[in-house]
Image (spheres, grey):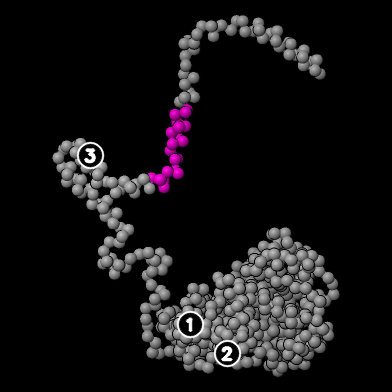
Amino acid sequence: MTNDTTAGAQAGLEEASQDTSSPITTTLANDARFEDLGLCPEILKAVGESGYTTPTPIQAQGIPHVLKRRDIIGIAQTGTGKTASFTLPMIELLARGRAKARMPRSLILEPTRELAAQVAESFERYGKYNKLSMALLIGGVSFDDQDRKLDRGVDVLIATPGRLLDHFERGKLMLSQVQVLVIDEADRMLDMGFIPDVERICKLIPFTRQTLFYSATMPPEIQRLTDQFLHNPVRVEVSRPAMTADNIVQEVIQVPNNDWAKREALRRLIRENPVKNAIVFCNRKRDVDVVAKSLQSHGFSAAALHGDLDQSVRTRTLEGFKNDEIRFLVASDVAARGLDIPAVSHIFNFDVPFHADDYVHRIGRTGRAGRSGHAYMLATSRDMKSVDAIEKLIGKPIDKRVMEGIEVREDRHEGPRQGRDAHRRGPKDRSRGPQPHSRPHAATHAAPPVASREAVPVEMPAPASQPEVQQLPPQQHQPRQQLRHQPRPAHKPQEQRQHAKPREAEPEVVDINRLPAFLLRPINLPKTEKPARPAKRKDADAEV
């Protein structure tokens, strides 16, 4: 494996601090231009119209290796131009050739729908002067529209693993002609349940493919998994893995262990800082909805974004956030992973992420393209171990301060009426007396004592007539319960079988001596059978 390593650099910066121990990469990062990377004039024209003049370190080091058809492991922090580092050389490689129906020439796997749509926009922007066809296979979209695009033949196929396998199992897609495979956000693809799907897809693609892995973090566990997918890869590493950008101001806000207090602290941070727009990250989808509604109720322009929302709602929400129609985007990690929104001023971590690597991806949404950014993280006393793990991962401490004067209130969103306790009555409900549904039960329980008092005399017929009148209300409910259990006639067939067995056994018990005498005289029977047998044989011989 070949290693090309440089020090940290920001996206869009022409000057970057480089490691003096690697003079080759220093020349590439400082003096490289898009014209020196071997790209065709059509691509250079599209890149120039997009406003880019100097490639980022991941682009300057990765594009030449991709053009040489080498496998690559690209490690770079978010916002350094990883998407362009594989889209530009892929357009160059696919410019010559033609795709067949249902046989894409390249495949790009993305973990989320939003990231897949973002890569599709990059291909449309950089490949507008190249006649390349593209198809986007994501959930929440009609199969028919996607099938029509596949039938025409596509050069670039961008998909999520689930929808890709759905088309393959329906017989609408063949992967035997894939020349380039790109797995973007590799750590997330392999770490969040996509391992079986990725392994299956890799087995369906020819062994001679070119595989490109790009991610912001690459733990050793994930590195061992990538060894089985790549062949003699080149490791292009821009900055140290899991390193955060220096132009992002980070701070930990210590708050009480109460959800209402955390929401109040979030609102205070928003009011104290000049927030243009911000992304609020939560660990759970339920908290995403709760925090979004809380911000809306206090007059903030906020919207929720998570995987349970319909695709049309998610697309509309992202467009509103990009167009400054929505000021605060409350999202989960998976939904906002890898989103390219350049002008995000603040990041608020409502929850400390479960995995320390997710912190790098979260705050990477701000401070992009050389801009300054601010990242705040709300932490309780229970979250300090996770904060220590984050500091150990990024290699530097994070400033901490305690937010004082926050009142702790009972959270109405988290009470005893959730989950299994949703239908239980509290102490206040018990003092209200019996509920309407409990009255019939009270009548059934009150009837037996009355009957027992009247049945004190030993007169049996008298109490027998009284219970018939008193048990009328229970008898109205008993047939309903019996009707519900009627479809279970499990014992009746067994009883019939038990009676059927002795009937079959009765002929065996019959004594032969009880039969009539003429049945016991088989003397004449052989005489009638002997002449019939030779006749049948003669007929058979005649037929032969």
Question: Which of 59/267 is in front?
Answer: 267
> Residue at horizontal 61%, vertical 5%?
524
Q: Which residue is mark 3?
A: 464
Q: CA distance from mark 1 to mark 3?
A: 68 Å
The label on residue 155 is: none
The amino acid pointed to by label 1 is Gln
> Residue at horizontal 83%, vertical 85%?
41
Question: Which of 18/451 is in front?
Answer: 451
The amino acid pointed to by label 2 is Ser
The amino acid pointed to by label 3 is Ala
Q: Nearer the viewer, mark 2 or mark 3?
A: 3
Q: Which callout, 2 or 3, points at the residue further toward the start of the chain?
A: 2
Of helix, strand and loop, which mostly describes the magenta segment? Answer: helix
Q: CA distance from mark 2 to mark 1?
A: 20 Å
Question: Which of 511/426 is in front?
Answer: 426
The label on residue 345 is: 2
Residue 152 in view in this figure: yes
Q: Which residue is mark 1?
A: 296
> Quick one: quadrant of the C terminus?
top right
> Residue at horizontal 66%, vertical 7%?
528
Circles 1 and 3, Cβ within 8 Å, touching? The answer is no
User: Where, by quadrant of the figure, is residue 490 drawn?
Assistant: top left
The percent coordinates of residue 55 (x first, y second) are: 74, 88
Q: Secondary structure at mark 3?
A: helix
Q: CA distance from mark 2 to mark 3?
A: 84 Å
> Residue at horizontal 19%, vertical 37%?
460
